Image (tube, rainbow, N blue to C red):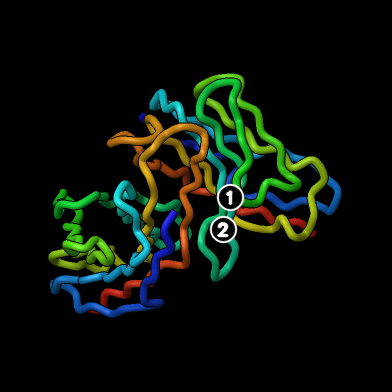
Amino acid sequence: DAKTTQPTSMDCAEGRAANLPCNHSTISGNEYVYWYRQIHSQGPQYIIHGLKNNETNEMASLIITEDRKSSTLILPHATLRDTAVYYCIVRVNSGGSNYKLTFGKGTLLTVNP
Amino acid sequence: NAGVTQTPKFQVLKTGQSMTLQCAQDMNHEYMSWYRQDPGMGLRLIHYSVGAGITDQGEVPNGYNVSRSTTEDFPLRLLSAAPSQTSVYFCASSYSLGGEGEKLFFGSGTQLSVL
């Protein structure tokens, strides 16, 4: 699976949009981009994923560049409850037995009042 | 639905003791997995299963044993606990491998200390 690079930490004001970047310059054509987050002491939580097109759900939006070498997770109106470590992961949705979803160190997003 | 349930939430062991971390899911998910998380590090895959009777190793399998006799349960066994196994353990499941079904659902974790 392709390696990802994320900033170690970011700050955001409550009510503002939080834009979390992720570089995945070695991504291949059949690899999806996934985002998860982990609030302190809890299990990670799935947020969103995409392949080529931008995606939006009730939690966030995912913007993938045209060359697919980077992406941005957008939380449109950040709240204090969004303070968490956000993980960007790229992997092939190929099924089979070679399943290893690798989590890096992620970005610690702190939402300030 | 309860989702993914892990027990116990906390456990203290002495070096050499054995124990089983329990994981159960009620979503009829085929895929289940175990991760460990150490301070300042991401999650590392220990073992995973793609269905009842089928298991495979992840990144850090040494010292751990798993089996999958039912779809619902995926216990993780520590045969002889070592201080290096002090960590937080997470169990995760998903509906399927590949395609749109590959969203992992995580349990709330088991914090294990080995003295």
Q: Residue at x 40, y 33 (%)?
A: B97
Q: Are marks 1 and 2 in contact (CB under 8 Å)?
A: yes
Whether B113 is drawn above or below B51: the answer is below
Q: Amino acid at mark 1?
A: Tyr
Q: Element at badge 1?
A: strand
Q: Residue at x 35, y 63 (%)?
A: A86
> Camera-side residue: A5 or A28?
A28
**Chain of the residue that carries numbered disc 1 in the rendered image:** B
Disc assigned to residue B37:
2
**Chain of the residue that carries numbered disc 2 in the rendered image:** B
Q: Residue at x 73, y 47 (%)?
A: B62
Q: Element at badge 2?
A: strand
Percent across and percent down for residue A69 are: 28, 65
Determine the image quadrant of residue B106.
Answer: top left
Residue B77 falls left or right of residue A35? right
Whether A98 is drawn above or below A31: the answer is above
Percent across and percent down for residue A49 are: 26, 50
Distance Cα–Cα, label 1 vs label 2: 6 Å
> Camera-side residue: A88 or A53?
A53
Whether A86 is drawn above or below B31: the answer is below
Q: Amino acid at mark 2?
A: Gln
Mark 1 vs 2, N-terminal side: 2
Residue B9 falls left or right of residue A81? right
Which residue does the numbered mark 1 point to in the structure image? B89
Quadrant where the C terminus of chain A is found in the figure? bottom left
| Label 2: how many Cα within 10 Å (few below 14, some 14–19, many 20+) | some
| Label 1: how many Cα within 10 Å (few below 14, some 14–19, many 20+) | many
